[in-house]
Image (spheres, grey):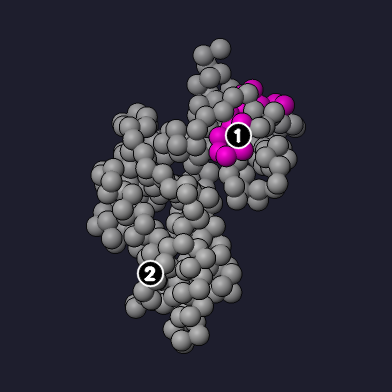
Amino acid sequence: MLVAGCDLGSAAGKAVIMADGEIRAWAVVQATTSPEKTAFLVLGEAAKLAGLNTIEDLQYIMGTGYGRATVSLTHDNMSEISCHARGAHWLHPAARTVVDVGGQDCKVISIDDEGRVLDFQMNDKCAAGTGRFFEAMSRVLHCSLEKFSELSMQSDNPANITKQCSVFAESEVVTLINNGVPVHHIAAGLTDSIARRLLAMVYRLGAVEDIVVTGGCAKNEGMVRSLESRLGHTIVRLAQNPQTVGALGAALFAREKLMQK
């Protein structure tokens, strides 16, 4: 049984291919202006890594993410909230709270012992607390996203960032730079500001352990550590690339659909 999940986010396309219930390959590509093209690129890359001749070898493809409804390559689609819940539970069955920080939104999802969604909180009104925010601040600090995370973990005196809007935060960061505040203290202040925003969403649902973080921003260890410190709970690091958890959940739903046929 050969199935795939394809997560078409605003910043990246992610695909996971499963064979007989196990992950065979996964891929991540930068999103294009066409969800159809992004799906073709990321599924093609994953298929190549899985040793397949063509995407058509896949028996069922489940789509998820913002671009899911407009793609002809997929057989069906599912919300990213359900897919992140299912993927996180498959990787860590004890997970009960999933914090997903993607390119365009962030969500906190409460799940049961079978990976079903019990409740969720979502911020999709602005770029604050998302990958877009980190990208914008990285440009201001003239560093890569990876360097941004490294810098934030070097600080013992994070700058106080009061603005969460990307536009106003950028102005605040420029002022701090011009005032001579070291860049690593600014990076730490920015990750702390995102952690505070996530913390409020977690508390609205209840911080039920185990807690995991998914999405591309989960690779920012500085942000994860800041959230962990403020929560006062250990955040479980997933064995799989956290950016692909939504695609993994979609692949699991694809497998279920195929078994029902």
For marks 2 and 1, give the one nearer the viewer: 2
Question: In the image, what residue type sits under mark 1?
Answer: Arg
Q: Give the CA separation, mark 2 to mark 1.
A: 35 Å
Residue 30 is situated, as x and y percent measured from the top left of the image, at 65, 51
Vertical side of 164 occupied by 109: above or below = above
Residue most extreme to the right: 53
What residue is drawn where x is 48% and y is 80%?
175
Residue 165 is situated, as x and y percent measured from the top left of the image, at 46, 62
Q: Is residue 64 magenta?
A: yes
Residue 148 visible to an observer of this rendering:
no
Residue 153 is situated, as x and y percent measured from the top left of the image, at 41, 70
Q: Give the numbered dot on residue 162.
A: 2
Circle 2 SS class? loop
Using the image as rendered, state which of residue 23 and residue 8 is in the foreground. Answer: 8
Residue 114 visible to an observer of this rendering:
yes
Residue range in magenta is: 56-69
The residue tagged 1 is 68
Vertical side of 252 occupied by 204: above or below = below
Residue 154 location, quadrant = bottom left
Which corner quadrant holds the N terminus? top right
Left of 70 or right of it: where is 84? Answer: left
